[in-house]
Amino acid sequence: MARHLLTTQQLRDWREVSLAQAPELAMELDWLLREAVSVEVRALGHAPSEKLWQLPCDLAALTELWRRHWQAHEPLQYVVGRSPWRRFELKVAPGVLVPRPETELIVEIASQRVAEVSQDLNLDLSQGTWVDLGTGTGAIALGLAELLPNIAIHGVDCSDVALEIAAENVASVRNGIWQSRIQLHQGRWFEPLLPLFEQGLKLAGMVSNPPYIPTGMLEELQPEVRLHEPSLALDGGEDGLDCLRHLVTAGSMHLQPGGLWLVELMTGQAEAVKALLQADGGYQSITGHFDLCGIERFVSALRCNT
Ligand SMILES: C[S@@+](CC[C@H](N)C(=O)[O-])C[C@H]1O[C@@H](n2cnc3c(N)ncnc32)[C@H](O)[C@@H]1O
């Protein structure tokens, strides 16, 4: 790969000019420098002006990456083609949702619920088959594979772009050590797994971060999301609950007795989703879980024993 030599002073000047274009985006600019060309701004501050830095691209290319973010509002993760999530470095691209930091918690909640179920109900969910519905980059499937080392996981998404990227991530994260435990399927929610259900498969766990934004709110989203992220990953129908309604009804058909149902939601949806689970009659131990900002962002439940 061609390398480009630049002095500290050239990089400092570039940063100053770029920052002047969008002073409110200082953190994003420094993130771009770190992720795109491995330059830490703190090190830039301390280095001698004439020190030479080896960059993978020239300043014109770096300027174009920055323009795509500050002017065209492209998410920085699309600009550099990857996103850190938990301790993984995931590939991302337009057409697949950038995995969010708050979603990192969903796999911790799954693992806690498995431990509780084992203690309180003497049921072992840590050995069975799980699904990650709407897998996107494969982030949740990979997180589950790491925290629950004995489960098999089916990741499903109806987007072929998402599935291609999920497959690349499953093959590359930790050199593909979880590849044999994660199978990816294209289709709508549980549908690609119907042949397995016909052979008697019941799921130990279902985890999903489905589209949940009410259609009318999509226009209010920040431009990075509204203009660039796929509406298929965001649009939850008129009240945001279309996919969640389906996951409640279908989940109780496909989970084993005591199996875990766990989803991510947006602010204000937890009570409605708990009510859907209650009304279905197929669930017990319906519980809300809070994110680090104190928002009730997740709801879990266990499939009734009968
Ligand atoms: C909010 S994104 C979540 C992506 C990923 N799980 C994450 O947390 O970063 C929702 C995902 O559901 C997928 N999706 C939307 N409708 C679907 C459907 N009917 N069946 C399967 N997947 C669907 C989208 O393509 C998208 O990848």
Image (spheres, grey):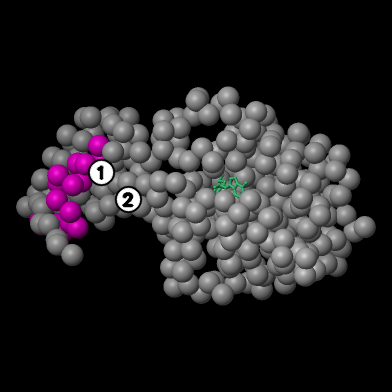
In the image, 63 versus 5, the foreground residue is: 63
- Residue receiving disc 1: 65
Residue 104 pos. (x, y %) = 56, 52
Q: Is residue 58 magenta?
A: yes
Residue 285 pos. (x, y %) = 84, 50
Q: Does residue 101 lie above or below 182 as drawn?
A: above
In terms of secondary structure, where does tag 1 sit? Answer: helix
Q: Is residue 146 magenta?
A: no
Estimate how packed mark 1 is, as few (under 14), some (14 to 19) or many (20 or more) residues with alpha carbons within 10 Å: some
Residue 196 pos. (x, y %) = 72, 67
Which residue is rendered at x = 68% and y = 47% of the image? 263
Which residue is rendered at x = 10% and y = 45% of the image? 10
Say which amino acid is labelled 1: Leu
Is any atom of residue 35 visible in this view?
yes
- Residue receiving disc 2: 80
User: Are circles 2 and 1 on residues that touch, CB within 8 Å?
Assistant: yes
In terms of secondary structure, where does tag 2 sit? Answer: helix
Say which amino acid is labelled 2: Val
Q: CA distance from mark 2 to mark 1?
A: 8 Å
In the image, 141 versus 31, the foreground residue is: 141
Which numbered circle lies on residue 101?
none
Please report the bounds of the magenta region as a residue range.
51-67
Q: Given the current orientation, which residue lies at the most extreme left position?
A: 50
Estimate how packed mark 2 is, as few (under 14), some (14 to 19) or many (20 or more) residues with alpha carbons within 10 Å: some
Which residue is rendered at x = 40% and y = 50% of the image? 93
Q: Given the current orientation, which residue lies at the most extreme right position?
A: 306
